[in-house]
Amino acid sequence: MTSTTLSHDVHPVHFDAYGKKLGMWIFLFTEVLLFGGLFLVYAAYRFLNHDAFHEGSAELNVVVGAINPVVLLTSRLTVAMSITALQRGDSKRAINLIMWTLILAGTFMFNKYYEWYTKWEHGLFPGMDHYKELPAGKAQFFNLYFFMTGLHAIHIIIGSILLMVIAFYIKKGTINQQRYTYLENGGLYWHLVDVIWIYLFPLFYLII
Amino acid sequence: MSDTQNTHVTGYRFSILIWVDLLILTLLTIEVAQFDFQSLTVIVALVIATIKSYLVGTHFMHLKFENKFLKAVVIGVGVLFLAVLIVLFSDYLFY
């Protein structure tokens, strides 16, 4: 980060916004294929264990599950608005909106914690007593549930750290009205993580 | 040098409008899940999810204002995933 900042100061002409964004998109494609592979595993196992996946899904709390997409959706709005604010030169508002995003991310994680905790209490985490007694199909459902929502949660944490760093550099003035690509890239990452949840939510919580 | 940045600015109001659209679609996803369309249930859920992703991609992720190359690659990745999914299921369905 520091070296990039330095090169800005020395060669301001070389700020390649398009290249930075293209690089981000290429990274996002690898993320899509990472989760895509997991969705394929999910699809195949669900096809083989249709009824077991229904039973497993019935044990997830739809209400708690339904709060999270709404929270994430709103956090995506605040990210989009913070980009608008920075493009209009209002860096203070941009930082405020990033803070709101972080609060919403925290709400999401708390919700997730609560949800995982109840499963943990019931011994449904892979390797625990109750989990070991489950029939194979249902065990596969919970295995995938914990792996995929867990991997998603790691992405939320990484995205939050990224946004924190970006907020710091907006405050410093390195990311500003003229050069907001880093904020845009942070926003792209955040939106992608949310798009993954758009698919995870109906596939895990809403199977009849 | 500032002209290297994409100059399109999305207004606050427009972002809020997209947010409302997505909220309605999320509620629709939950509502639709109450009905059993048999084998179509998953398809319905995935179609709504894809409409939501499309809205996010074009407006929030700004793809609408990006160049053709980037759009083409995004569509390419989607097609690649769909192709792998079809090949996988052609294997399972006719096993």
Image (tube, coloured by chain):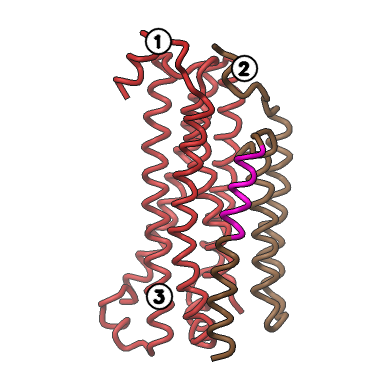
Chain colours: A red, B brown
Q: Chain of mark 3?
A: A
| Secondary structure category for the residue under label 2 | loop
CB under 8 Å between discs 3 and 2: no
Quarter assignment of residue A76: top right
Residue A138 image point, x, y percent: 42, 83
Q: Chain of mark 1?
A: A
Amino acid at dot 2: Arg
First-in-chain label (3 vs 2): 2
Range of residues picked out in magenta? B68-79
Spot the residue most to the top: A10
B76 falls in the magenta region = yes
First-in-chain label (1 vs 2): 1
Do callouts 1 and 2 point to residues on the same chain? yes
The answer to whether A163 appears left or right of B34 in the picture is left
Q: Nearer the viewer, residue B13 or A66?
A: B13
Q: Nearer the viewer, residue B21 or A13?
A: A13
Q: Nearer the viewer, mark 1 or mark 2?
A: 1
Question: In the picture shown, does residue A58 fall above or below A36?
Answer: below
User: Spatial distance from mark 1 to mark 2, Cα to Cα?
Assistant: 24 Å
B1 falls in the magenta region = no
Residue A145 image point, x, y percent: 42, 69
Q: Residue at x 52, y 78 (%)?
A: A58
Q: Nearer the viewer, residue A154 or A37?
A: A37
Tell me the chief SS of the magenta region.
helix
User: Spatial distance from mark 1 to mark 3, Cα to Cα?
Assistant: 53 Å
Amino acid at dot 1: His
Q: Residue at x 60, y 65 (%)?
A: B82
The answer to whether A39 appears left or right of B68 in the picture is left
**Residue linked to disc 3:** A142
Q: Residue at x 53, y 50 (%)?
A: A194
